[in-house]
Image: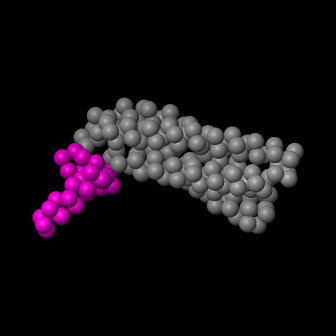
Amino acid sequence: MDATHLHLLINHVPILTTVFAVLILLWGIIRSNKSFQQLAMVGFIIAGILSIVALQSGEGAEDTVENLPGVTESYIHDHEEAAEITNWIAVALAVVSGVGFAISRFNPGIMKMYLYVLLTGGIVSAGMFSYTAYLGGQIRHTEIRPETTAGQSGAVASTLNQIEGREERT
């Protein structure tokens, strides 16, 4: 198994783990269930660790796909930049979750507020993971790439098409 296979195998796990951890934490908050709250914190820790693995294996995957037909450096670069930010968020959330175990044991009075901080961080992390995955998919899946005109971004092409359409009507 090379880095590309490892990346494709592992990169979905921290995304799904984070999404499920957010749902578990939400349920734990609603039901005031400490076991679910702790399970969610473990999920965030696992997602943070696996995020590091996904980021590191992505470097090797880049070497494999960068010269394939239809793959451009801009798609790889966008995905890589988002992955680095997402990784920092996931690792920070993992650390905050680890601290949450200590807080729940030594200062349970502030735990309710702390859980809302974790929930917010989890939602942000899940959103960033989803965006990063979307950008990663664009590397090889042309069907999800924005429409382009002469190499322009989808937003620019859309704007130009709208302007051209308006000019024809006048």
Whether residue 62 is in magenta: the answer is: no
Picture quadrant where residue 164 is located: bottom left
What residue span does the magenta drawing correspond to? 141-170
Direction from residue 67 to residue 18 in the image, left or right: right
Please say whether residue 151 is visible from this viewpoint. Answer: yes
Name the spot of residue 99 as percent of width and height, x first.
Answer: 75, 42
Residue 32 position, x and y percent, is 79, 63
Q: Main secondary structure of the magenta part?
A: helix
Q: Position of residue 92 (x, y in %)?
A: 64, 40
Q: Quadrant of residue 116?
A: bottom right
Q: Nearer the viewer, residue 159 or 122?
A: 159
Q: Is residue 18 left or right of residue 1?
A: right
Compared with residue 125, is residue 163 higher up or lower down, i.e. above or below?
Answer: below
What number of labels is visible?
0
Residue drawn where x is 33% and y is 46% of the image: 140
66 left or right of 53? left
Report the residue at 80% width, 52% height from top. 111
Q: Is residue 2 visible?
A: no
Figure colour scheme: one colour
Q: Residue at x 25, y 43 (%)?
A: 70
For this orientation, the residue located farthest to the right is: 106
At x 65% / y 44%, what residue is drawn? 93
Position in image of residue 36 (x %, y %): 74, 58
The residue at the far front in this view is 170
Q: Which one is nearer the viewer's eye here, 160 or 154?
A: 160
Q: Quadrant of the C terminus?
A: bottom left
Please check the rendered image and state whether residue 164 is part of the magenta-colored stretch, yes or no: yes
